[in-house]
């Protein structure tokens, strides 16, 4: 006899549904609350989803076999802009996305015709993913299912975001963010092609030199090296722009002019000048020294301002470029010598010269310069000390002196921040290349707050994270996290309660949603309506704040219903096991920890 395994699967799925085996309510058994990152329904499940959800299901079934009362629920994350970008591309008849829908996802033609409406895309793939989960036999309590745009969930998010603001965790101010210039929205991992999180490097600084009546702005990661500048580099083959920036005339590359237009500055291109015409001129340093401008073809117009300051004692590329010019008999370059400003054990006075010679660097186009630069920069940062040419910073370790010099230059009007996208190019799902934009009067989650970070670190110490080595990644992420935009002006989602022009963004409304699973079944069965979900209701159920009588009076629910929901939350919470992909450590999973401890 040959078994038909498909029939066997159907048989047991029917029995599980008939017996309501996975519908879990509080009882007198010990519980396990197992959750997994809910999917974003803009495509069918891929193998990564299958692995993550199957591991969670196996975990749930394992604990059921051990006698635990296991809750394993599921929701669907509609929030954000990905389906908006898809809908625009479909409406425009973009061949690549239409071919993918037809030939890879096998979406029926009549469904594709409706995909000009973003919600239709999400609804279609929601059902596609859910049916796949059912076919896989996942032991999910489907009574608790919700999407992030249903009214009940939106009430929950309104409460969450208001509570964070009341606690001082949400602030308003100016901060650099990844930005889509077409959609006019901040972007995060879920909004980009390939799910790439835009990484903002806000340790990049702009130092201003004077070139006649113009500003010659140059970006650097190492403001401490300003004391060792011998010359400035321009690319002789680049046409630079004269740009009015907040009333000052800057000379920068065309690419830089576009970048700074997103920095909340008043920018206007007023003219241009070939790089070859700048060579031989001098620019005035912060201390009044006249610094010579020399040619270097390694200078990329797309990097920084398209201009570079040269510190040949400590920058291998600068040392080699100056050496190459001298070898060609360049008269102006022949007069320049490196100015050492950092003393580092294991190196002499000109460490850039030593490392170039050690690695056998041939010229300024040699690929070995990248390795030489990384090695020397790290060594000087960790072990280097500033010398007496650095004025009052003499004797400071580089890793501490850098910040002090940055502050000193900024206070004296010579330096400002110049944030860049360090993992560029990053593309929005609409196809546009993302940029860095400095947003004013934007709402941010203040993840840079050290007290909040401390609470998260303490929580991590109490958590078991598998595999164990990932805990280090959590610590690193929490260390570098800073203010993060929590709202945008387009997309699906929940409006900010106090500013209806803004919508809570997708990595801010998906951090404590596991708590809503304990409430959603009461909303789904009609025992509770969204109108019943008041602030006092959530305060009492989730924070044990206030009392039942206040929750009853504001929600208009009976005390019995509120007590049932309170019992549900108290029994199942906290989450016992959270399953996800490793790629979410850098955002969602770290935010999950931070928002729970808030």
Image (tube, rainbow, N blue to C red):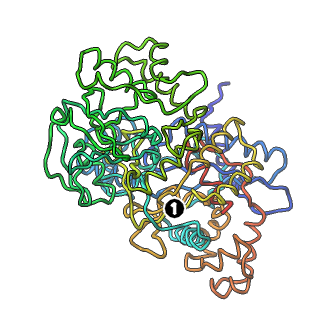
Name the quarter where the C terminus is drawn. Answer: bottom right
Residue 339 vertical placement versus 503 (above, below):
above
Residue 105 at least partly seen: yes
Could you say which is closer to the camera, residue 119 or residue 597? Answer: 597
Q: Which x, y percent locates residue 205? A: 41, 46
Residue lying farthest to the right in this orientation: 28
Residue 123 at least partly seen: no
Q: Residue at x 64, y 66 (%)?
A: 521
Q: Residue at x 33, y 53 (%)?
A: 115
Where, by quadrant of the figure, is residue 303 drawn? top left
Residue 228 vertical placement versus 248 (above, below):
above
The residue indicated by pointer 1 is 148
Q: Which x, y percent locates residue 289? A: 33, 41
Q: Is residue 66 left or right of residue 376?
A: right
**Is label 1 in a helix, a strand or a loop?**
loop
Where, by quadrant of the figure, is residue 422 drawn? top left
Q: Is residue 275 left or right of residue 547?
A: left
Could you say which is closer to the camera, residue 327 or residue 262? Answer: 327
Could you say which is closer to the camera, residue 438 or residue 588? Answer: 438
Name the quarter where the N terminus is drawn. Answer: top right
Number of marks in the rendered image: 1
Q: Residue at x 64, y 44 (%)?
A: 474
Q: Which x, y percent locates residue 400? A: 58, 44
Residue 194 vertical placement versus 443 (above, below):
above
Q: Residues within 10 Å of mark 1 (few under 14, many from 20)?
A: many
Q: Residue at x 60, y 21 (%)?
A: 346
Q: Which x, y percent locates residue 222? A: 46, 39
């Amino acid at each position: 006899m040959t078994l038909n395994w498909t029939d066997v699967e159907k048989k047991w799925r029917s029995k599980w549904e008939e017996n309501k085996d996975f519908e879990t309510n509080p009882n007198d058994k010990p519980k396990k609350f197992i959750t997994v990152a809910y999917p974003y329904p803009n495509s069918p499940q891929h193998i990564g989803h299958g692995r993550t959800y199957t591991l969670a299901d196996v975990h749930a079934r394992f604990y059921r076999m051990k006698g635990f009362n296991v809750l394993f629920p599921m929701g669907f994350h509609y929030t954000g802009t990905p389906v908006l970008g898809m809908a625009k591309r479909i409406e425009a008849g973009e061949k690549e996305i239409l071919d993918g829908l037809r030939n890879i996802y096998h979406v029926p033609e009549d469904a594709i015709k409706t995909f000009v409406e973003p919600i239709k895309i999400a609804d279609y793939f929601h059902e596609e993913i859910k049916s796949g989960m059912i076919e896989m036999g996942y032991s999910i309590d489907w009574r608790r299912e919700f999407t992030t745009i249903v009214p009940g969930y939106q009430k929950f998010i309104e409460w969450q975001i208001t509570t964070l603001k009341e606690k001082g965790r949400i602030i308003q101010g100016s901060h650099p963010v990844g930005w889509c210039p077409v959609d006019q929205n901040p972007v995060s991992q879920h909004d980009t092609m390939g799910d790439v999180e835009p990484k903002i490097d806000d340790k990049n600084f702009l130092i201003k030199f004077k070139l006649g009546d113009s500003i010659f702005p140059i970006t650097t990661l190492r403001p401490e090296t300003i004391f060792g500048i011998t010359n400035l580099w321009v690319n002789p083959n680049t046409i630079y722009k004269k740009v009015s920036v907040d009333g000052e005339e800057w000379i920068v590359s065309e690419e830089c002019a576009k970048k700074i237009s997103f920095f909340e500055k008043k920018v206007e291109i007023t003219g241009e000048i070939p790089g070859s015409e700048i060579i031989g001129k001098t620019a005035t340093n912060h201390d009044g020294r006249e610094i010579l401008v020399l040619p270097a073809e390694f200078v990329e117009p797309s990097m920084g301002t398209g201009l570079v300051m040269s510190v040949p004692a400590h920058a291998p590329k600068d040392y080699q470029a100056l050496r190459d010019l001298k070898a060609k008999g360049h008269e102006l370059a022949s007069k320049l010598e490196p100015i050492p400003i950092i003393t580092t054990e294991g190196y002499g006075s000109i460490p850039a010269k030593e490392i170039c010679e050690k690695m056998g660097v041939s010229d300024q186009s040699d690929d070995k310069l990248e390795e030489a630069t990384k090695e020397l920069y790290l060594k000087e940062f960790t072990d280097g000390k500033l010398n007496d040419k650095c004025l009052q910073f003499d004797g400071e370790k580089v890793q501490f002196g850098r910040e002090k010099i940055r502050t000193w230059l900024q206070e004296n009007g010579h330096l400002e921040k110049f944030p860049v996208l360090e993992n560029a190019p990053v593309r929005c799902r609409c196809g546009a290349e993302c940029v860095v934009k400095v947003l004013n009067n934007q709402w941010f989650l203040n993840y840079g707050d050290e007290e909040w970070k401390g609470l998260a670190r303490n929580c991590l110490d109490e958590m078991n994270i598998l595999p164990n080595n990932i805990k280090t990644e959590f610590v690193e992420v929490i260390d570098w996290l800073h203010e993060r935009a929590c709202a945008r002006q387009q997309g699906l989602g929940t409006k900010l309660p106090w500013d209806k022009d803004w919508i809570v963004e997708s990595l801010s409304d998906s951090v404590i949603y596991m708590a809503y699973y304990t409430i959603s079944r009461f909303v789904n069965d009609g025992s509770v309506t969204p109108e019943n979900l008041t602030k006092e209701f959530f305060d009492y159920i989730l924070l044990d704040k206030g009392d039942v009588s206040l929750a009853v009076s504001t929600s208009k629910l009976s005390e019995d219903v509120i007590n049932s929901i309170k019992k549900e939350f108290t029994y199942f919470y906290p989450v016992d096991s959270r399953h996800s992909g490793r790629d979410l450590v850098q955002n969602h999973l770290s935010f999950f920890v931070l928002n729970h401890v808030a």
